[in-house]
Amino acid sequence: MNYKCLDDLDKASDSRQRPDTLLLVGAFIFLALAVLRKVIDILASQYKWNDFLTAIILMGLYSLGSSFSAGCRGGLFMCAINSFTCRMKVELFGALVKQEISFFETIKTGDITSRLSTDTTKMARALALNVNVLLRTLIKTVGMLSLMMSLSWKLTLLMLMETPITGLLQGVYDNYYLRLSKEMQDSMARANEAAGETVAGIRTVRSFNTERSEAGRYDHRLMDTHNLKTRRDTVRAVYLLLKRLTALVMQVAMLYYGRLFIQRGQMSTGNLVSFILYQSNLGANIRTLIYIFGDMLNSVGAAGKVFEYLDREPQVSTKGTLQPETLTGHVHFHNLSFSYPTRQGRKVLQGFSLELRPGQLTALVGPSGGGKSTCVSLLERFYQPQQGEILLDGQPLHSYQHHYLHRKVAMVGQEPVLFSGSIKDNIAYGLADCSLERVQEAARRANAHSFISQLEKGYDTDVGERGGQMSGGEKQRIAIARALIREPQVLILDEVTSALDTESEHMVQEALASCPSQTLLVIAHRLKTIERADRIILIDRGSVLEQGTHQELMDRKGGYYKLRERLFTEDDTSH
Ligand SMILES: Nc1ncnc2c1ncn2[C@@H]1O[C@H](COP(=O)(O)OP(=O)(O)OP(=O)(O)O)[C@@H](O)[C@H]1O
């Protein structure tokens, strides 16, 4: 179902849910009650066949009309609930994917899926279904109350005494229920998270033979949820028992006083029977009203969490507007200081400055954990530096329009992620109306065309979930093609050649060299691959230690020279 359809459906159901239906239902109810009383009075006094027949026909008509309007109302409200739920999920998902990367590092996946699946449904139910029942019950209650007052105000007052007792009971129950519901939601999120994590990391689970312990972990978390549910259901059973008992006591009192009023001639038998029939209906209605109130209260928790995410403004703003027609791709990291939001106490970059020039290949090298990938993440605006700024063609990165920036600055990561779908869809990811020729051209440059052509379905081959049906090298070449097709001005390759054979690596490097005006930033562990770089930057502990060409750095015999020596010695011993 697309967005437009949802809107249309909403409008349609909105326009059909006018109070006319409810008024109609109310009118029919009163009609039935009036008829009912008439029937009883007829039977109790003198029996007239014609009067009886009229009453029965009226009742039949009422039943028919009320069933019809109840069906229509129920159907329309269900439609409204479904479309509302769907729209909430889409809106919430849209708000979630807008958030900055560190948001996803702090919020657990199970929590997000639980918000998307359970809370949105609860919220929609609360709004649409409860509003439906609330309106219907309210109209019925007011109508019945006025009729009962006209029959006997004393009995009506007696009957209303039940309400505060039930209300008190409901209040205590609701408080407890609300607390348990929150605990249950969190517990369900934890269980979902355990299952999701295992499925996502099934290869690791299999190779470490931890299937049983993962199943045990899931079972353990489900048991927590189960225990909470049992506690909730027990409390609910006790609450229902107490509520029924209160209603029973009230009914006995009603019968006793009703009989007294008949004996004193203050009421007819028909009136009492009508009153009791109204009363049992009214009692149910009042209980429904109280229940709905409680249910709405419970949904407030779910709605609160949904709105919290819907209203959340991403901390890394995407409100830039700059979209210059030409961009040279000159990047300047200016005196950056940065700590990851999840580890605020630890500076990953400190007074970090670096320049990437158009038409040059710059390579970042250095020991693991030195901060190379962090530079790339900042250039991609995944995070915001606490101090300093990154300039692109002299303008701060945040002033560029979000889509423009990510079209001009493309990255291929260490572990490229593909999405389930065809190879073509993955290469043209995020580009509307992209021709097959363009896709093939990008694939050729990434040295992916030949292996794709050999596949039975070619570019229509499904890559599997997260690209699971492709090898590491194939995934990387598809990811390189996905970046190249955008013809970015700044291209970042984070350790991309690690899964490529020498032949593919050579061809990819040739392809990259064929864009002479592009700014190329490469992160490499295999130092051999970057010897031809225009500039090599050695980074350690968040600072630039050395920079220059391979020859300059070798001649200097500093950190780069030692790193190279060490890596080559390690390579030799491993062979
Ligand atoms: N998302 C994160 N949250 C918190 N700390 C992080 C995060 N990513 C990286 N770090 C930390 O920041 C430091 C720099 O990491 P970074 O990934 O930039 O290093 P690197 O030089 O690219 O390492 P490698 O060569 O192993 O990929 C490391 O100490 C790492 O533990």
Image (cartoon, rainbow, N blue to C red):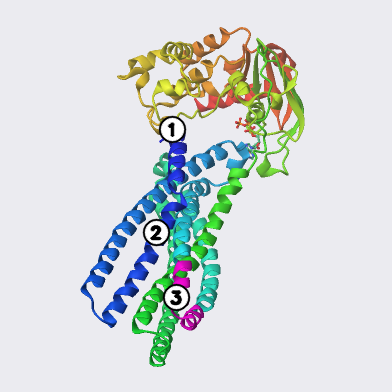
Residue 466 badge: 1
Disc 2 or 1, which lies upstream in sequence? Answer: 2
Q: Nearer the viewer, mark 2 or mark 1?
A: 2
Left-right relation of 364 to 156: right
Upstream in sequence: badge 1 or badge 3: 3
What residue span does the magenta drawing correspond to? 141-161
Q: Which mark is residue 25?
A: 2
Q: Which residue is mark 3?
A: 148
Answer left or right for 382 relative to 192.
right
Ligand 1 sits in which quadrant?
top right
Q: Is residue 558 visible?
A: no
Disc 1 residue type?
Answer: Arg
Amino acid residing under circle 3: Met
Task: Give the mark nearest the N terminus, 3 or 2.
Answer: 2
Q: Secondary structure at mark 3?
A: helix
Whether ligand 1 has any atom under 8 Å from the Cβ at mark 1 is answered as: no
